[in-house]
Amino acid sequence: MALTIDDDAPEFRERLYEAVQVTDAFSSSQVTERVTGLASDFGRHIQCIHKAIRAFKPPYPGSPEINCHAYSLEIYDTEEFLRILVEPESPFMESLDEHGLLDEIPINDAAEGDLILYRSDDETPHSEIAGQILHSGRVTGPLIRSKWGQGSVYEHTVFAVPSGYGSDLRAYSPPSREDVVAAYLDFCKYR
C-alpha cells in the first residue's frame, strides 16, 4: 500500500505543536488525549501506538530517553544506544546524509519501512535553519509511524504532525541498522 500524502494544514499543525509542549501542567496521557482530540476535531488520522511512560526504562518505545530519530532508525534497543543514551539529534541525522548512508527516493515511491525525514523550510515556525532535519518516522502502509519528542509513538498521515517538525518531506531507503549503529558510535566519540 502506497504512502498517502495529505494536505499541509497549518492551523491544525500549529495546534498540534501547542498540544505537545509538555509542561508540569500536562502529563503525557493528557498530551496524548489532546493530540487525538485535535485529530478528531480536524478530521485527521492520528493513533497512539505506544504511550509515553516514564516508569519504563529503554528500550520501551514510549520511554522519554528515546527520540524520534532513535525510534525511526530502530537503534533504541541496541546495546550501544542503551549504553550511551545520547539522543541522535539533527546533527547526527545530517551526518548520516553527509556520509552517504541515506539514499533518497521519490516521496511518491515511499513504501513499507522506508525512512521519512521532515526538514525545516522557510515557512517552518519555531525553526531558524532551513533544511535542518527536525523529525523522522517510518512508512507503515499508507501512514507514518513516529515518536513525538519525549512523548508517545503515533501512526499518522504525512502532515498530521506538529508545525515545528517542518514541511519539507523527503523519503529514503532505510540504512542498515549495523551502519547506523557504527555511525552513532563514531558520532558520539566527538560529543
Image: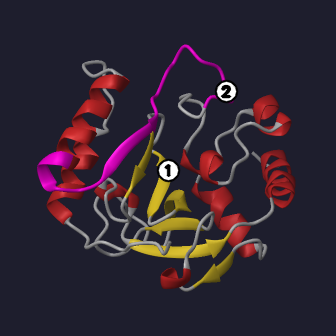
Per the rendered image, the range of residues in magenta is: 40-60
The location of residue 166, given as percent across then percent down, is 38, 65
Question: Is residue 97 something one can see in this rendering?
Answer: yes
The location of residue 133, given as percent across then percent down, is 52, 64
Seen in the picture, residue 154 relative to 110 is either above or below; the reply is above
Question: Is residue 126 something one can see in this rendering?
Answer: no
**Residue 26 in which image quadrant:** top left
Three-letter residue code for mark 2: Pro
Seen in the picture, residue 26 relative to 90 is either above or below; the reply is above
Q: How many callouts does the rendering have? A: 2
- Residue at numbered disc 1: 146
Q: Which mark is residue 161?
A: none
**Residue 67 in which image quadrant:** top right
- Residue at numbered disc 2: 58
Q: Is residue 46 left or right of residue 61?
A: left
Q: Is residue 35 left or right of residue 88?
A: left
State the residue lying farthest toward the front: 1
Could you classify mark 2 by the number of other residues whose Cα lies within 10 Å: few (under 14), some (14-19), or many (20 or more)? some
Three-letter residue code for mark 1: Ser
Our reading of the magenta stretch's main secondary structure is loop
The location of residue 118, given as percent across then percent down, is 46, 66
Could you say whether the residue bearing mark 1 is in a helix, strand or loop? strand
Q: Are marks 2 and 1 in contact (CB under 8 Å)?
A: no
**Residue 87 in which image quadrant:** top right
Seen in the picture, residue 71 relative to 150 is either above or below; the reply is below
Q: Is residue 22 left or right of residue 40?
A: right
